[in-house]
Image (spheres, rainbow, N blue to C red):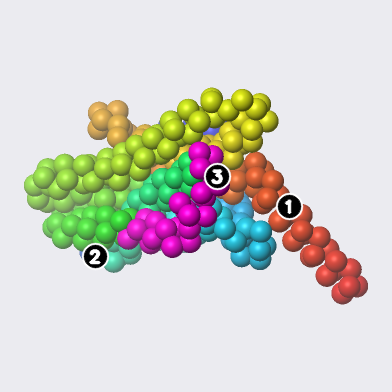
Amino acid sequence: MMKVPSFSTFSISSVASVDITEKRNTTSDFILLGIFNHTRPHLFLFMIVLTMAIASLTGNALMLLLIHLDPRLHRPMYFLLSQLSFMDMMLVFTIVPKMAADYLTCNESISPAGCGLQIFVSLTLGGGESFLLAAISYDRYVAVCHPLRYPVLFNWQLCLQMTLGSWFLGAVDGLMQAAATLSFPFCSSHVIDHVFCEAPRLVRLACADTSVFENVMYICCVLMLLVPFSLILISYSVILSTVLQMHSLDARKKALATCSSHLAVVGLFYGAAIFTYMQPKSYRSANHNKIVSAFYTIFTPVLNPLIYSLRNSEVKEALKKWLGKCSNFKCHQT
């Protein structure tokens, strides 16, 4: 496992940046301090993050391409996986280009509209992905526990309804929180000590009583996480019970193999989400939030396509087929 470099030096430099940015910020724009300073170690870390972001976009785009081109992957489960890849790509596009531009141009300002857009998109994708993972868990439940009735219990109509429902619920949560956050009056300090605009960080700058909104926001985040997570736990509890009743060892291995990739993605997503939204405030710090945010917005989208491609025989066969076509095309060209 790669050892993550220490970010303890960020706090001192952030204080200095706050003093400078407060003096130069005379507009209504906000100032995003980001996660990197202009030093050699931070430049190296910035290049790593940028490489990971490019790898994330490439891997998820390749997953979308394979699912679109290979007829064997034109099934509800892979359609849900394509939506997961699309959400990961959107998340990277929303966060990384702005972060990279700020670092390279030393222009850390972001307009209220841009800040609201980041809040809306990040919450839409986070909430939508949590419900999408619940839909995938139901797909695995039907595939393992009711394989003969799979075309009836999980048809294309239900798959599309679940997908649209995931996007809709995430968008509603994102729109409400973005609109409510930007409706508050903000003090003279518009400095956000974070990687991107998040509603909890922005609310702290408001010159008004935000306790009611913070409680509502916390409840919404918990519900958007716990409701899908509860459905996932129920699905896999039934799956585990069914697998334990199987007499064939090969059947058990095959059933567990179909679920292991999804469980790994669920663990990554909910692990980062719990550390971000469900820890007590006394245990949080600016550096801690930055590191966790960088993990679930950059590193997790890199791992998702790797997990599904390396542990899924059908995806690997589709990749080999596509690479074979590409090599044959190059041979004909030469």
Q: Check whether the beta carbons of the residues at disc 2 and disc 3 lie within 8 A of each other.
A: no
Tag 3, which secondary structure? helix
Q: Which label was assigned to residue 231?
A: none
Residue under label 3: 147
Q: CA distance from mark 1 to mark 3?
A: 22 Å
Q: What residue is at 80 percent from the left and 65 percent from the top?
A: 325
Name the quarter where the C terminus is drawn: bottom right
| Coordinates of residue 237 in the picture (x, y in percent) | 43, 31
Tag 1, which secondary structure? helix
Is residue 12 something that shows in the picture?
Answer: no
- Residue furthest front as drawn: 148
Give, as a single range, the part of the protein colored magenta.
143-168
Q: Decide: few, some or many residues near mark 1? Use Cα within 10 Å; few <14, some 14-19, many ≥20.
A: some
Q: What residue is at 35 percent from the left and 50 percent from the top?
A: 127
Name the quarter where the N terminus is drawn: top right
Return the disc, 2 or 1, that comes first in the chain's sequence.
2
Left or right: 184 as drawn, with respect to 167: left
